[in-house]
Image (spheres, helix red, strand yellow):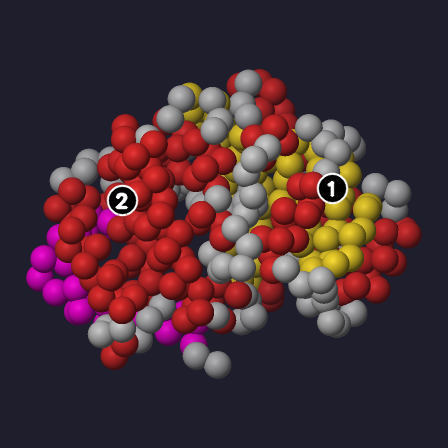
Amino acid sequence: MVSVIVPVFRAEKTLERCVSCILAQDYGEFELILVDDGSDDGSSALCDWLGRADSRIRVSHGENRGAAGARNLGIELSAGEWICFVDSDDIIAPDYLSSLIRRAVDTGSEISVCAHVKCLESDIPAIGHTLQFFGEHPQKASSPSAVYRGTDGLKALLYQRGMISAPWAMISKRSLWDGLAFPEGTAAEDMGTIYRLFASARVISYTDRALYGYVQSAGNTIHSTSSKRNPDYYMHSREMLDNIRSDHPDCLKAAESRHFSACFQILSETAPEKEQTPLIRSVYSDIRSLRKDVLFDKEARRKNRAAALGSFFSISGIHRLLYTRYRKEFPAS
């Protein structure tokens, strides 16, 4: 059985759509756990209404602990052999669970990952028509389907070969979460958790079929609170690099590439006039210390190697360019 965990906080506008996608799965062996994380809108009542309407749904209400706390509670409550996370504003294809389970069984994987498609709220069809959406929005995956053994799966994650440091767009064995939890009280908790999960798995499979729809919106916490999120994002990324260096030295180059990418993401979300803040000074310093290794690492992404080359000319120039592009895509509210 798969335990599908949905953290819920101020999600009354999107929750029913999300739950509808899950209940419409062509794979029947699952439970749906809605973790109401102290919502102060109509989400709490909606969770209860949905729970009464379908016996596969279990509802838990609690004080606000953030997404990390809600996911941790969901894991504690889970009864399935597999764990699956879906965000309350996202959508999944009707064969999402069956495809990931089949892939896991066929390959003997402990983690089964799929490609995802990014979409806007305006792209999402009415409830019950997600099959049409995934058919009309095919996503060209950045990496081909693959099966990774040993630390190759961790390397693929860190090199960002189709897989990202997010808990969704995958299923994982419940046993892998024994002794592992999302760090509470910080933002960007995924960055501090998913690489540990991958490091504990012996076999990881990836399919280039886009079965998960990641919905981008103005209220998305990644984009609306980046100034608060980025210090924690940097902290978790830097901690990841240090832990990989000590525990998995064969993956060090991949970890350097991943942290290098995180540094430039932080720059893209931070106004250039803040370059003298402690965070941005640390980011600039890390770029200088890693750029040579990344530039000559043939396994690193092309964009990382290009950024490494450009940084020898002007880090601040790249900073300004990235921030300008970011603000065009996500205008300040």
Instruction: Determine which quarter of the picture holds residue 185.
Output: bottom right
Instruction: State which mark lies toward you, 2 or 1.
Output: 1
Tell me the magenta residue range.
303-331
Quarter occupied by the N terminus: top right
The answer to which of 108 and 252 lies nearer the viewer is 252
Query: Three-letter amino acid code at disc 1?
Result: Leu
**In the picture shown, does residue 19 fall above or below 103?**
below
* For residue 95, side relative to residue 196 (left or right): right
Residue type, numbered disc 2 = Ser
Crowding around mark 1 (Cα neighbors within 10 Å: few <14, some 14 to 19, many 20+) is: some
- For numbered disc 1, what is the local secondary structure? helix
User: Counting other residues with Cα less than 10 Å from the Cα at mark 2, is it few (<14), some (14-19), or many (20 or more)?
Assistant: many
Taking the spot 26% from the left edge, 43% from the top edge, the residue there is 256
In the image, residue 171 lies in the stretch drawn in magenta = no
**Which SS class for mark 2?**
helix
Q: Position of residue 223 (x, y in %)?
A: 47, 67
Q: Where, by quadrant of the figure, is residue 38 drawn?
A: bottom right
Which residue is depicted at the point 60% across and 66% down? 122
- The numbered disc on residue 257 is 2
Q: Is residue 320 magenta?
A: yes
- The residue under the point 85% across, 57% down is 48
Task: Work out whether residue 248 or residue 96 is closer to the camera in this orientation and state it.
Answer: 248
- Identify the residue under disc 1: 77
